[in-house]
Amino acid sequence: MSSLSLAGRKVLVTRAARQAGKLSEGLRTLGATPVEVPVLEIQPPESFDALDVALLALPAYDWLVLTSANTVHALSDRATELGAPLVPPAG
């Protein structure tokens, strides 16, 4: 019996192609065989209009909840381009 916790198992990795490598390498380290099948592709929107309006109105909100590292990076980049970088509110 192998001491690797995932030895002999195949694991489906559905991350975007440019993001799958690190997860796949970690799985290999644990003995798994990663099967990379990207099911999404990260691309900018056709128009930033609605996003720009929302980003410029952020000071009016109490909360901003982001559930993806991709979203954090994209919003931060866009807010910086608008001259309104994302920073925690004072207090």
Image: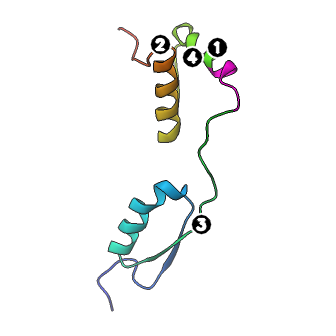
First reached walking from the N terminus: tag 2 or tag 1: 1
**Which segment did they paint magenta?**
46-51
For the residue labelled by badge 3, is the local secondary structure a helix, a strand or a loop? loop
Residue with the mark numbered 2: 84
Give the alpha-carbon distance from disc 3 to disc 2, as whole Å: 36 Å
Residue with the mark numbered 4: 55
Query: Disc 2 residue type?
Result: Ala
Query: Disc 4 residue type?
Result: Leu
The answer to whether marks 4 and 1 mark residues whose Cβ atoms lie closer than 8 Å is yes
- Position of residue 32 relative to residue 25, above or below, is below
Query: Disc 3 residue type?
Result: Val
Q: Position of residue 5 (x, y in %)?
A: 36, 77
Give the alpha-carbon distance from disc 2 to disc 1, as whole Å: 11 Å
Give the alpha-carbon distance from disc 4 to disc 1, as whole Å: 6 Å
Closer to us: 65 or 85: 85
For the residue labelled by badge 4, is the local secondary structure a helix, a strand or a loop? helix
Residue with the mark numbered 3: 37
The residue located at (40%, 17%) in the rendering is 87
